[in-house]
Amino acid sequence: MDFTFSEDQLLFRDSVRDFLVNEVTPERIRGIWESDSGRDDGLWQQLAEMGLTGITVPEAHGGLGMDELDFVLLAQECGYVALPEPLVNTALVAVPVISQLGGQAAAEWLPKIAAGETRVAVGCSDNGLAEDAAQAGLLLWAEPQALYLLTPDQFSARFNESVDPSRRLYAIDIAAGVLPAASGEQAAALYQAVLDRGALGAAAQALGLAQRMIDISVQYTSERQQFGKVIGSFQAVKHHMANVAVRLEYAKAPVTRAAYALARGEAAQVAVSHAKLVACEAANLAAKNSIQVHGAMGYTWEVDLHIFMKKAWAMAGTFGDTGFHKQRVAEHIFADGVALGAGTTF
Amino acid sequence: MNLNYTDQQNAFREEVRSWLAEHVPAEPLKTFDTEEGFQQHREWEATLNKGRWGMVTWPEELGGRACDLIEWLIFEEEYYRARAPLRVNQNGIFLLGPTLMEYGTEEQKARILPKMANGEEVWAQGWSEPNAGSDMAAIRSTARKDGDKYIINGQKTWSTRAVWADWLFGMFRTDPDSERHRGLTFILVPLNTPGITVRPIPQLDGLPGFAEIFFDNVEVDVANRLGDEGAGWSVAMATAGFERGLMLRSPARFQETARRLVELYKANQASADRDPAVRDAVMRAWMDAESYCLTTYETACRLTQGGKIGAESSTNKIFWSELDQAMHATAMSILGARAELLPHAPDAGDVGTWLDGWLFAQSGPIYAGTNEIQRNIIAERMLGMPR
Ligand SMILES: Cc1cc2nc3c(=O)[nH]c(=O)nc-3n(C[C@H](O)[C@H](O)[C@H](O)COP(=O)(O)OP(=O)(O)OC[C@H]3O[C@@H](n4cnc5c(N)ncnc54)[C@H](O)[C@@H]3O)c2cc1C
């Protein structure tokens, strides 16, 4: 029993964190919002140069060959900076699913993804829309009975604006006659994989987002004065943030556990749903309490808090909303004959 | 990372399980808030100790098994699964024991720990006073040094299980001119010393679960001081650290409550589902108990590899006490009109022990440092917010 990350995993996380915090600043994100594509090719190239676009691509296909457990720490850092680029979906969803498809698809696309030549977008019918579909060279579109790998000429995309300007969402129309890359049982399994992996990515980002909102709020409330004192010295303000810290502290291990289950190929559905629910709950509480301690400043476009708050709101509904995930937890714990209680966790 | 138990850990679990299966009393003991129940629980401690299961993390020469924290968690899981008796001496074995090992002299350890381990000497904690609750540094009870004795005067209160306990570990002001947390000393006091009056205080359930203690020129050997004179605060903080941290409330306890809650819900589903919030609350209970378990394992692994517990341990107390309240509140909703009935009421039916648990859950956010105090600590020490 060893529930710790290795020294190497933590060091890699630290260096990626340094890079992201320096490069993906709120100013740069606002610049991305203003751009036509809503994406930053320079940033994607930087991520590729660090090996991140290919982090889960097998070494044989030019990647780093790391697994979900290596990446889950990095996904939290992506959340911490509210990275607009689709790195989490690439590394946690697209690459592993294309690897599972194997064959020609894997040989063709994985090296290009690793090299940063092809951006890959991910969508599933449960979400309805696909992120980044119009910016990508390849769209992985999952339905319960069919999995498609689509090049831009094989579908049309209709932009849907999100409250989070970093999210570029598209409704998809697949051109007539395009065949799925997988169907039937194989597609059903891959559809589950897309949902579980996407949900884990959202959960991990939610943890980072919550931490970022805490940090922003602690800093703001340590500077802003009222009644002749910094507002962070008021107990009501402190307790708002302490409440977030408690929920966040206990959401971390469930996310790690879910990543572990996926990495080891164990049954992961309940662990993923548990992780997604508690992590998104922590992030939403962080958003609610952070805007409150900012006062009117928090209600403005100018203050950076909303960059993180809006992403946190979006994470709660994507790759399975709370109803979806609660239903899966309920099916597990209310089933007949299931082993619950002390000693049944591992 | 490897989330599988080792063969050795699995074998350990088997050993605990089979020993408990053989030894846990078939009839639940009476509550230790009665004299008879207290005695029964004392005997159970002796039984545990004979099997070397009293405190598995203690070194072997003290009757322990030198277990690491993971094995301790496994032990606790089996213990709660087996519905073994609550630990009457938990203030001793979980709080004072580890503090003694860190701060005690060899003589103190040899004299005190074995009798603590076998239940011969049950310990009460004497920190709170009428005017020193959350503000523990306001302690006013004094201990005046007189040769090789301390002369103690003053009053302690809310001292759990002090009605039938044998010893008290307390904090007293040894420097009359001192203020706040300076000048306090950690002293171990036999409760049968002349000059001590123990007055039971009935708790919510009407039973004398704690007591106030009056000291009138009580003489205690200086050899019963733990740590240096005037250093009581830092010794006490070590105890509080253990208390807040892992030992006091292991996840197994809450996972078992969550499991029973799922059972209760399933057995009463038709009526429970009339309130749609109940099903959600049951799920949350299960998830939070799991989160608590996963997080505790993560912490335990970090600590066994040499990591340190930091201010984030204050989140622990809030998390389990609020979880415990929420779980019992949900059970009360499910039981509906039966919820208020005492278990022995002739028409109580299947109410079980939920009411007792509900009563006790009310105290979780209060004892061991109120949750408001914990939130202050989290904000200031973990998040770095201004004082
Ligand atoms: C079941 C039980 C068992 C106990 N066992 C023991 C024992 O064995 N030994 C022992 O020494 N003590 C024991 N205690 C006492 C316990 O430690 C105290 O009750 C606790 O420290 C709170 O002190 P108080 O009761 O005086 O409440 P107060 O300190 O008067 O607090 C009352 C309320 O005011 C709030 N408050 C106080 N100060 C602040 C602040 N600075 N900021 C925000 N809110 C604040 C508190 O959070 C609380 O909500 C026990 C208590 C209970 C309920």
Image (tube, rainbow, N blue to C red):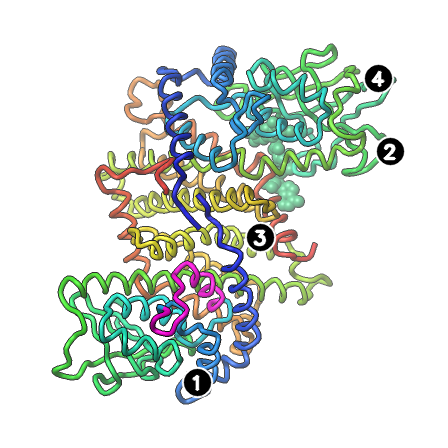
Measure the alpha-carbon separation of dots 2 and 1: 70 Å
Magenta-drawn stretch contains A65: yes
Residue A239's label in the rendered image is 3
Magenta span of residues: A59-79
Q: Which residue is mark 1?
A: A41
Numbered disc in front, either 2 or 1: 1
Q: Are marks 3 and 4 on the same chain?
A: no
Numbered disc in front, either 1 or 4: 1
* Residue A345 location, quadrant: top left
Q: Which residue is mark 4?
A: B148
Give the image location of residue B84, x and y in percent: 41, 23
Give the image location of residue A52, x and y in percent: 44, 72
Q: Which residue is mark 2?
A: B177
Q: Main secondary structure of the magenta part?
A: helix
Write down the chain letter for disc 3.
Answer: A
Ligand 1 within 8 angstroms of badge 2 C-beta? no
Q: Classify the position of ligand 1 by quadrant: top left, top right, bottom left or bottom right.
A: top right
Please, what secondary structure does the residue beneath circle 2 have? loop
Measure the alpha-carbon separation of dots 1 and 3: 42 Å
Q: Amino acid at mark 2?
A: Asp
